[in-house]
Amino acid sequence: MVNAFAEYPSLRDKVVFVTGGASGIGAEIVRAFAGQGARVGFVDLDRASGQALAADRPGVAYEYCDLRDIASLTEAFAALRARLGPVAVLVNNAARDDRHNWADVTPDYWDDRMDTNLRHQFFAIQNVAADMIGIGGGSIINMGSNSWWEAGGGFPAYATAKAAVHGLTRTMARDLGPHRIRVNTVVPGWIMTERQKALWVTEAAINAHQKRQCLPDLIDPVYVARMVLFLASDDARMCTASNFMVEAGSI
């Protein structure tokens, strides 16, 4: 089946920042915005992959950033802003779904998982909000997960952080709405990134998961990126404070 994806004229020349954009879903999002003619900047801890992606997409800007360090986030965003201009779209994509046993979790590990999967989303929003207010509006897309909707086990700190993303989305949609800034959550299911395939995909796991989905097909990262594009575009101008599921009906 050949995909005939939509083009969004409203995204052309918009400045888009993506966190965790060097690989997986994030890299697909970067490529999707670049394909729409947006001015894309992204940050990531993986310097080699980030530089390679930026080199492969002329006009796309990359800055190294450890998002657990808010000062590093601020510095990286400032560098991207100096190159690209004020931000119209923020995609809070960065996260790591590392597996862990609840009995082994320490306070330090818990705090690190919150820093990795949740805290930076708020401070990224705080960082770009003035830009969006200045240009008369914007779109913020936070990446959630259906892991907690499914009552999935094996990563309680990750699932807790991702559940909290929905609260962040709803409250910031209310606070920023008067400035015509929209805030939404994209909720991926089990997306077949290279990391997932390398670490957790087995025949048994795939067979069990497909039984939970309404649709029979495995989910490629491109479909998450396409939902993000829609929410960033003017087509979604009246969409805010909501969840947009890309999980093939697996809840």
Image (cartoon, rainbow, N blue to C red):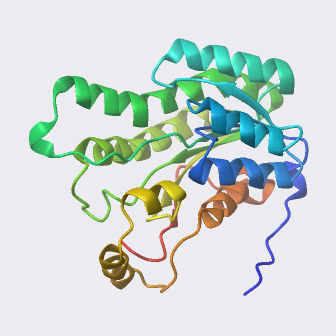
Residue 18: in sight, yes or no?
no
Where in the figure is residue 32, as x and y percent of width and height?
A: 76, 55
Nearer to us in this view, 136 or 212: 212
Tell me if residue 151 comes above or below residue 54 in the rendering: below
Is residue 194 left or right of 181 when viewed as pictured?
left
**Residue 234: quadrant of the picture:** bottom right
Nearer to us in this view, 218 or 9: 218
Instruction: Kindly identify the residue that appears in the image at 30 percent across and 48 percent down.
Output: 159
- Which corner quadrant holds the N terminus? bottom right
**Residue 90: quadrant of the picture:** top right
- Which corner quadrant holds the C terminus? bottom left
**Residue 79: quadrant of the picture:** top right
Where in the figure is residue 45, as x and y percent of width and height?
A: 55, 29
Nearer to us in this view, 163 or 196: 196
Nearer to us in this view, 7 or 45: 45
Instruction: Kindly identify the residue that appears in the image at 82 percent across and 45 percent down.
Output: 56
Residue 173: in sight, yes or no?
yes
Where in the figure is residue 189, as x and y percent of width and height?
A: 45, 65
Tell me if residue 66 comes above or below residue 23 in the rendering: above
Instruction: Kindly identify the residue that appears in the image at 47 percent across and 44 percent down.
Output: 170
Kindly give the residue lying farthest to the left in the view shown: 103
